[in-house]
Amino acid sequence: MFSSHSFLHREIKNRLEDRLKDIRLDFKFPIAIDAFDDFFGLTDKLDLVGNCADLITCTGNIHWTNDLPGILIQIRQALRPNGLFLAAFPGGETLGELRQSFIEAESSLTGGASPRVSPFVDLADAAALLQRTGFKLPVADQDRIIVTYEDVDSLMFDLRGMGETNSLRDRKKYFSRKDVFFEMKKLYRENFSDQEQRIRATFDIVFLTGWSPHSSQPQPLRPGSGLKNLSEVLKKSN
């Protein structure tokens, strides 16, 4: 069951809720979309109407969509003016140890490598997506969570239980050779184990914060409207 492997999603949800507590606003029409619900899976169409919410949160799931820009546009359109969007999901270098171990093992034994770990959005791309899809005052930041396991089998058992296995269409559809798996496990332990011989797995959690447009929000100055030349300010500071 998902609940038996949901420690990561619970941690993501707790961290997102902590960030929400820092925002001193009383939201009257919130919508929460998280990995514990069936509301949002791999679909690219959300059942939301325009201007229906003043707060939308997405927890631990938005990385599974096939059209992330499209989902963000739908969320922005569903927000009321000055509505808040908060999301938290695995991104960055998540499962980098597993990816590297698979690539090295398969390359050395077969002469090539296929994608074994789903790709994750990096922090710079996440921030750019917020701006591209029309959010104002966009902020993207990242937390890193390190989890240790007794062995690779325990890690992969957890990943299957939490629904975070490879979903790429271009992945191999047949069983991999046993020697590739044995080599991958050996490389993983050699390169990513601690003094107690427990392997580590990295989960980078990307947080997105954006607001739907509103006239009360701070606006950038018109280019060329500054009163002082930046070079003069820098000279004085030196």
Image (tube, rainbow, N blue to C red):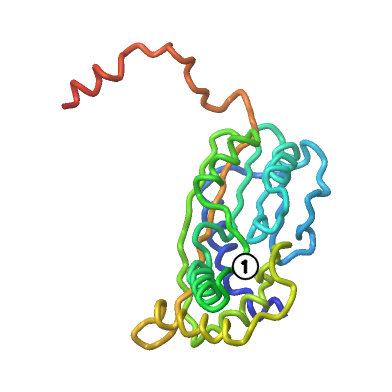
- Residue 44, x across and y down, in percent: 78, 50
Q: Tell me the residue that label 1 is attached to.
A: 114
In screen coordinates, is 220 left or right of 35? left
- Residue 73, x across and y down, in percent: 71, 39
- Residue 169, x across and y down, in percent: 73, 62
- The answer to whether 29 is drawn above or below residue 233 in the figure is below
Amino acid marked by disc 1: Ser
| Picture quadrant of residue 74 | top right
Q: Nearer the viewer, residue 169 or 83?
A: 169
Q: Quadrant of the N terminus?
A: bottom right
In screen coordinates, is 77 left or right of 236? right
Q: Residues within 10 Å of mark 1 (few under 14, many from 20)?
A: few
- The answer to whether 201 is drawn above or below residue 137 in the figure is below
Name which residue lies at 41% across and 77% down. Answer: 192
Name which residue lies at 40% across and 87% down. Answer: 197
Residue 231 in sight here: yes
Name which residue lies at 50% across and 76% down. Answer: 108
- The answer to whether 80 is drawn above or below residue 85 in the figure is above
